[in-house]
Amino acid sequence: MSTDDPAPEPQDPELPPRRRRRRVHRGPILFVVLVALVAAVVAQQNESSGSSSSTAAVAARAIVGVPAADVASSAWYCAAGTSTSSGAATETVVIASLARTDIEVTITVMPGGETAPATDTIRLAPGEEVSVPVADVLATAEPGVVVETVGGPAAVSHVLEHDGDIGVESCTRTSATDWYFASGTTVEGSHHDLWLFNPFGDDAIVDVSFLTDTGMQEPAGLQAFVVPRRSRVTIPVQDSVLRQKRVAAHVHARTGRVVAEQTQIFDNVNVDGTASTGIALSAGATAPSTEWRIPAASTRHGGRVRLALANFSTDDANVAVKAVVVGGVDAPAQTVRVPSQGVELVDLTTRIPLESDVALIATARAVDGRRVPVVAELLATWAPASSSTGLAGTLGSTVTAARWVVPVPDVDGEVTITVYNPGPDPVTAAVLAAGDVDRRVGPTSEPELAIAPGRAKTVRSTRLGGRPIATVVTANHPVVVGFTVLGNAGAAVSAALPDLTYVNPTHGG
C-alpha cells in the first residue's frame, strides 16, 4: 500500500459512512507532514543531480499524477475559487473514483483566521463521479479546499464559473516552493488574480515577481508576503502591476510551501484586436521546461489560439512553436525569440484552419549548444459574436504517460478529448468510462483510436443517464491527453491527469 502527500486526518471511524453527502463536523484539522518531508528530501536529491529539464519532469511527476492503484489515501489541494454569493469565481469540486471498491471522500474547506474549517464526507461507488459546490460545505470569502480520499485512488478537479463562462483545471496532490505562470495581463477591463493556498500548520513567506512589457517587476508589497497557515489568500495582480499587456508571474516561498493557481477575468478586453469576455483558470508550473505539450486547443466556434512564452532565466531563449491539426495539415513550426526575463505572446490563429482542434508543442532550441527552459501557457478566446463566448487557459504538460484520466465537468457544453502521440511509433488508445477500466469482462474500448506518430485525434465524451462520467484513456505507448469544453456554459481547456504509475501489461509502458 502507498500513501500520498500530507492530508488532513481522516474522519472519526466510528461515524458510519453514507452515500449521501452530509456535514460531519467543524474543528481544527491536524496534518500528517512526515510523508511530505520525506518526499521533499527525495525530490531535492533528484533535482540536485539532474538537468533543468529533468528537474521539471521530477516536479511535474510529483504534482500532477493520479495516485497509484494501491494507494491507501491521498489528498488533493484546490487553490482558486470563491464560495460566497458575492464571489467572482464560484467553485465546484469534481471528484471521480478510480477504485474498484467504495471509497470515502472528505472535503475540507479552510476559511483562514479564527474561523474553524468545515468538512463534508461522502462515499463513492467504483467509477462514480460527483460534483460538490464548495458553498455547500462552507460559504467563505477565501476558501482553501482539501479533498482527501480513503480506500482507493481518485481524480479531483474543479470548475470556476463567472458570468456565464467556466474555467476548468485539475487540483494538485502536493505543494511547492516555486510556481510559474506565463499568461497574464493587466490591461483595462481585465482582472488577474493569483490564488495562494497554505494548507499546512506553519505560515509561509513568499516573494512574488513579474515579467512584463517593461521588464521585471518586484512590487514591494509582495516581497516577504505572508500566507498564513491553513489559509488561502488572493493577490490582485493589477493592483501591483499597472496596465501591462503581457504579465508572467513567479511565486517563490522563502519558508514553507504553497499551492498556486491563477485566474484571468476579461470584461470586454481587447487582446490583439479581439474583444473577449470570460474566465480562464490555470494551475502553475513548479519549474520551467525545455518542452511543453498543450494537447487541446481549438478554433471551433470562432476560437482564437495564443501561446504565452515566459523566460525567467538570464539568457535569451529560442522556442519552436508547432500546431498539430487534428485531421488536417500542420503549419510549419515557427521559431520565437524570447528575451531573458521576458515574455512573448504568439498568435497562432491565422496558422490554424477554422473549426479545427489542435495540439500545441513548444520546444526550446539550442543556442550555442544550450537549451534555455521556458514556461508556455495557452490563452484561448471566443468573442461574444461566436457561438461559444469565453476565455480559456492551461499550461498543458511536460510529461507523457500511457494512461490519463479526465474528470468530466458537469456543465452545459460538449467535452472533446484530444489524444496526442509525440513518439515515433503508432499508438492505439482505448477510451473507457472509469468504471469499465481493467475489467475482465465488458467493453474493451468505446471507441478505440489509432494515432500515427506526431499526430492527434479527438473523441467526444459521453454521459451515463444524463450525468457526466470520468473517462480514462489507455495507450500502448506514452501519449499526452487534454480536453476542451465548448457550449452554453462557455469555454474551457485543460490537460488531463496522467497516471505515471501505470505500466501497460502488453507493451511494458
Image (tube, rainbow, N blue to C red):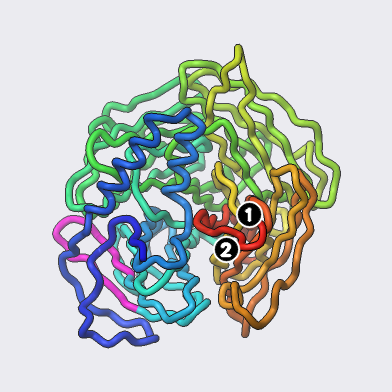
User: Could you tell me how far apart the alpha carbons at marks 2 and 1 are, in whole angstroms?
Assistant: 9 Å
User: In what quadrant of the picture does the N terminus appear?
Assistant: bottom left
- Per the rendering, the mark at residue 481 is 1
**Neighbour class for label 2 at 10 Å: few (<14), some, many (≥20)?**
many
Give the magenta part as a residue range.
107-121
Secondary structure under the numbered disc 1 in the rendered image: strand
Secondary structure under the numbered disc 2 in the rendered image: strand
Nearest the eye: 462 or 11 = 11
Residue found 58% across the figure and 74% down from its top: 469
Would you say the residues marked 2 and 1 are in contact, meaning their CB atoms lie under 8 Å apart? Answer: yes
Residue 193 visible, this angle:
yes
Which x, y percent locates residue 327?
83, 52
For residue 206, above or below residue 123: above
Which x, y percent locates residue 494?
57, 53
Nearest the eye: 377 or 273 = 377
Residue matched to label 2? 406
Which x, y percent locates residue 419?
69, 55
